[in-house]
Amino acid sequence: MQESSDQASGSDTLAKIKAHEVERAQKWAKMAKKQEKNGEVLHSFDWSPKFVKRVYKGIPDCWRRDAWYFLATSGLKGLNKDAALKQKYEHLLEMPSSHERQIDLDIPRTMRDHIMLRERYGFGQRVLFNVLRAFANYDEEVGYCQGMSNIVATLVMYFEEEKTFTMLVHMFQKCNLHNLFIQGFPALVESFYIQERLLEQHLPKVAKHMNNNDITSSSYATRWYITLFTGGIVNYHTLLRIWDVLHMCGFDVLYYVALALMKTIQKKILEGDFESNMMLLSSIIPVEDDDKFMKVVRKYYERSVEAGTIKKLRNEYKNL
């Protein structure tokens, strides 16, 4: 009897979740403005406090494709470039790449539990290979770096092949990812400095404990930033919420995602030593409540924008 009761309770909970998702999707449908560009049906949104609030609350999954594209293109600006990018993509696919072997080796290790990427040389893996190889030819200075496979795989979940490529280009431009991946990883090294200063400001006990245990941000946060948090840092449902705001705010919001994650596990960090903390920070960090987590991210980020914190820290880093 208890088992039947638990099953009924679980079914009721699932039904409520689905009903809530349908209700949220309907609200987004009312906000969306349909238009046709370059033979493609797109949707735009009025950039209002309500819109920003709803992005932070999580974009309904059925609207992620449209909303991510709208956000990544800064409100569908520069769409004329996409037609040229799609043509260029076809040309780039015909070109050989010195990165092909490494890309092919990395693909089976990329989100391998996801149904779209599970089959070796299946449709999803072929799309992932094509986009990564084409981009290596598009931005030869970047070429290919391992973290990129997870980023592109996340896009493949929502976009067809050509659109995945154009989305990747838009993300590189909006988030300045070029400097994250070029030789020497200058934006990554800068990120370590900024994260450590933010830890000192907001979580001084955590910063001091980690410093005393010789744990630097470079020892654990490389995969955080180089994969834009797609490299098994958080559970998939949390990752999607992070990417909702990433597309809206740009790369800098990730510093506050990192800070919010550190706040989530600060008790464990303070109780741990070097070995246990490195294991903790190298594993998936569970976020119990995505809504509460994103509220913390928003509070941190919006206060920093108002104070110009990241700009100040970047200037500080450059003047070292």
Image (cartoon, rainbow, N blue to C red):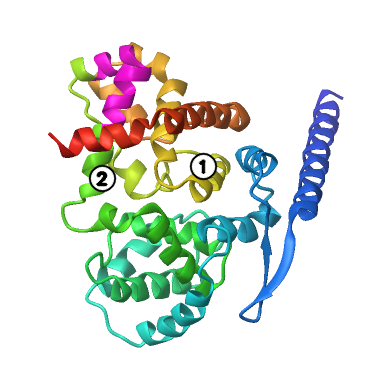
Foreground pick, 199 / 81: 81
- Give the image location of residue 318, x and y in percent: 17, 39
| Quadrant of res 279 | top left
Q: Residue at x 20, y 35 (%)?
A: 317
Q: Which residue corresponds to mark 1?
A: 242
Q: Which residue corresponds to mark 2?
A: 188
Q: Residue at x 53, y 48 (%)?
A: 248
- Give the image location of residue 147, x and y in percent: 33, 54
Highlighted range, magenta: 194-210
Q: For residue 209: magenta?
A: yes
Circle 2 Cα neighbour tier, 10 Å, few/some/many (<14 / 14–19 / ≥20): many
Q: Helix, strand, or loop for circle 2?
A: helix
Quadrant showing the N terminus: top right
Q: Is residue 246 left or right of residue 202?
A: right
Foreground pick, 317 / 274: 317
Q: Is residue 299 left or right of residue 25?
A: left
The amino acid pointed to by label 1 is: Ile
| Residue 249 in view in this figure | yes
Q: CA distance from mark 1 to mark 2?
A: 18 Å
| Quadrant of res 29 | bottom right
Q: Disc 1 vs disc 2: Cβ atoms closer than 8 Å?
A: no
Residue 99, above or below 3: below
**Of the image marks 1 and 2, the number of the one nearer the N terminus:** 2
Tally of marks: 2
Q: Residue at x 54, y 72 (%)?
A: 79
| Residue 123 in view in this figure | no
| Quadrant of res 182 | bottom left
